[in-house]
Image (spheres, rainbow, N blue to C red):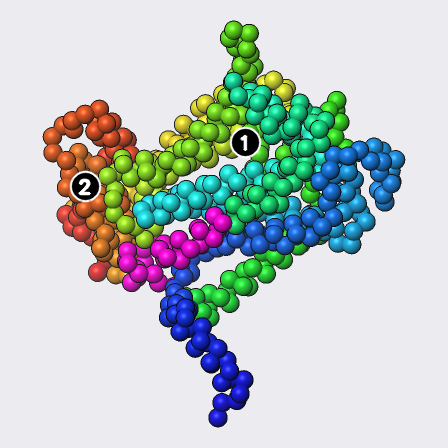
């Protein structure tokens, strides 16, 4: 017989269900299936890093003073005792040395920020190289790019708040980049900073503090929530495999399996951040000293996600123009404004551009391997190589000093590499992906090489091939796009190989009419590699192979 507590609980739940229909929603939610592939954990790392940032950031907010009022430091750190500094820097030192657990929280917060941006970047790479951005998930890709941009800006704002010498140097660069924008640059810089830099009005640090703790986190929280709601509604993507189609997901149910695993993963991420915060020093602001506009510390470098901007500024040649008495600093405007704008806008438009080139209008829930779309993979490596060289360019002085190279020679080598390096990486990656795909085609149609050599009656030596197991053969066919259930292949007209992206349209007939149609045909020829895949069955009419029965 039910106790009074159980009866009251049932009545309460029934009351809520009668008004919100929550029982059916919870039943569907608990039965929702999540794929088991490890790469899906990358997004969870970003989510849990954000949770850690919110918790530790709330604690740090209680002790930080967002003020540029000049004070004399009399805290526990003896080397700076008696030095005049802003209240923002003094409160950071107080938080680090005099608040119980303050330094640990600062370092956990900083490491979580680094991990947050890194996990978003790697998660975006996984989405890009597997084609998870395709219809119907294009909007979620746009949200992801926006999250990456906002996370980068949030991180920059966070380590700029202490007003130490390193962060002040970074703010001076940001001020110069704003001023380099023609016509509106000086107005924009004055609007953001409140006056000429270094700001004498005392407005900038309080403004930056509100942006860092309120404005950007609120937008991030809203976008992350929208991102997860869209994923929940559209269901997860998955790699081709047994029983997997475009209309189902194979994996573990949300409750209890996924709930247990994801909560364990949350504590694992928290543990890693706590370990790094306790044993790996990061951003020791007491070593840099307070910001002084007349000083720049040697080897000044930002966090990793700003390195590409630092590198672009260092590698750009010194170019300026003067029009009607107005100077345009191309050496700042191009690498600091135009180049990042091009990079992020390309990320935004790529899904629509690829869909337009391939005429792909189908829904996709099955992912692709990078080798199965060689051109996209090569373009991705092209971009990563460009980014990596900019990253190294942000350390040209440290590299030159460490390896005893000439700074000018190091800079010029990187200027050359930034032009030719991405193209070399593109070519090597595409040939590599095509080679792997051709190898899979041979395995699918002729089986695995056994290493057994036999001699035919004619005297010719051949290698014996082992047929693939039926299940492995079916999976490989799905991965290559030959046998995707409920998933049409792209037209293979003009000799282009079908990549299994699907649109169900018939190949075009005749020469395309119009400049846009001709441009799309040219880009389609660029996107798809022209080659003939082996269509014969295992050992059929192939004098060079023999299939073991």
The residue that appears at 56% across and 43% down in the rendered structure is: 216
Disc 2 or 1, which lies upstream in sequence?
Answer: 1
The residue that appears at 16% across and 50% down in the rendered structure is: 540
Residue reaching furthest bottom?
1
The residue that label 2 is drawn on is: 491
Which secondary structure lies at badge 1? Answer: helix
Which secondary structure lies at badge 2? Answer: loop
> Residue 181's spot in the image, x, y percent?
53, 21
> Does residue 536 appear to the left or right of 443 in the view shown?
left
The residue that appears at 63% across and 57% down in the rendered structure is: 271
Cα–Cα span, label 2 and label 1: 39 Å
- Residue 167 occupies which quadrant of the picture? top right
Taking depth in this image into account, of 365 and 549 the one nearest to the observer is 365
Residue 456 visible to an observer of this rendering: no
The residue that appears at 87% across and 40% down in the rendered structure is: 74
User: Considering the image in quadrants, where does the C terminus appear?
Assistant: bottom left
- Residue 503 occupies which quadrant of the picture? top left
> Residue 417's spot in the image, x, y percent?
49, 24
Query: From which residue to which does the magenta span run?
Result: 222-251
Residue 392 is marked as none
> Residue 406's spot in the image, x, y percent?
63, 19
Magenta stretch: residue 232 in it?
yes
The residue that label 1 is drawn on is: 308
């Amino acid at each position: 017989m039910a106790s009074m507590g159980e009866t009251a609980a049932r009545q309460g739940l029934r009351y809520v269900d009668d008004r919100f229909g929550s029982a059916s929603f919870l039943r569907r939610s608990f039965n929702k299936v999540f794929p088991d592939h490890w790469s899906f954990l990358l997004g969870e790392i970003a989510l849990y890093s954000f949770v850690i940032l919110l918790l530790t950031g709330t604690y740090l907010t209680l002790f930080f003073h967002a003020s540029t009022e000049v004070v004399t430091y009399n805290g526990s750190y003896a080397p700076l005792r008696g030095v005049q500094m802003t209240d923002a820097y003094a409160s950071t030192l107080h938080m680090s040395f005099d608040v119980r657990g303050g330094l640990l929280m600062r370092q956990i917060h900083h490491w979580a920020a680094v991990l947050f941006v890194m996990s978003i970047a790697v998660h975006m790479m996984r989405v890009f190289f597997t084609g998870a951005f395709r219809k119907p998930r294009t909007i979620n890709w746009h949200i992801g790019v926006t999250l990456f941009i906002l996370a980068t800006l949030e991180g920059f704002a966070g380590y700029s708040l202490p007003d130490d010498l390193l962060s002040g140097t970074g703010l001076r660069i940001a001020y110069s980049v704003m001023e380099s924008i023609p016509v509106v640059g000086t107005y924009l810089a004055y609007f953001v900073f409140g006056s000429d830099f270094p700001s004498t009005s005392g407005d900038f640090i309080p403004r930056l503090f509100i942006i860092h703790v309120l404005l950007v986190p609120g937008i991030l929280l809203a976008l992350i929530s929208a991102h997860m709601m869209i994923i929940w509604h559209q269901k997860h993507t998955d790699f081709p495999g047994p029983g997997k189609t475009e209309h189902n997901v194979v994996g573990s149910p949300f409750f209890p399996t996924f709930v247990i695993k994801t909560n364990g993963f949350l504590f694992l991420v928290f543990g890693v951040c706590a370990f790094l915060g306790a044993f790996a020093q990061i951003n020791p602001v007491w070593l840099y000293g307070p910001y002084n506009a007349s000083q720049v510390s040697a080897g000044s470098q930002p966090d990793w996600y700003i390195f590409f901007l630092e590198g672009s500024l260092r590698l750009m040649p010194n170019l300026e123009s003067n029009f009607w008495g107005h100077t345009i600093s191309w050496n700042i405007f191009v690498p600091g404004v135009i180049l990042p704008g091009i990079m992020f806008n390309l990320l935004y438009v790529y899904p629509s551009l690829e869909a337009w080139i391939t005429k792909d209008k189908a829904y996709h829930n099955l992912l692709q391997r990078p080798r199965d779309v060689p051109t996209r993979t090569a373009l991705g490596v092209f971009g990563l190589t460009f980014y990596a060289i900019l990253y190294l360019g942000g350390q040209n002085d440290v590299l030159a000093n460490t390896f005893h190279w000439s700074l000018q020679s190091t800079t010029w080598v990187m200027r050359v590499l930034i032009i030719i390096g991405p193209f070399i990486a593109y070519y090597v990656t595409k040939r590599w992906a095509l080679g792997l795909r051709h190898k899979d085609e041979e395995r699918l149609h002729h089986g695995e090489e056994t290493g057994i050599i036999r001699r035919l009656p004619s005297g010719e030596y051949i290698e014996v091939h082992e047929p693939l197991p039926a299940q492995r053969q079916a999976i490989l066919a799905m991965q290559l796009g030959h046998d995707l259930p409920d998933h049409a292949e792209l037209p293979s007209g003009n000799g282009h190989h079908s990549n299994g992206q699907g649109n169900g349209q018939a190949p075009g007939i005749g020469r395309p009419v119009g400049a846009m149609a001709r441009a799309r045909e040219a880009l389609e020829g660029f996107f798809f590699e022209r080659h003939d895949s082996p269509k014969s069955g295992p050992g059929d009419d192939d004098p060079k192979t023999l299939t073991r029965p």
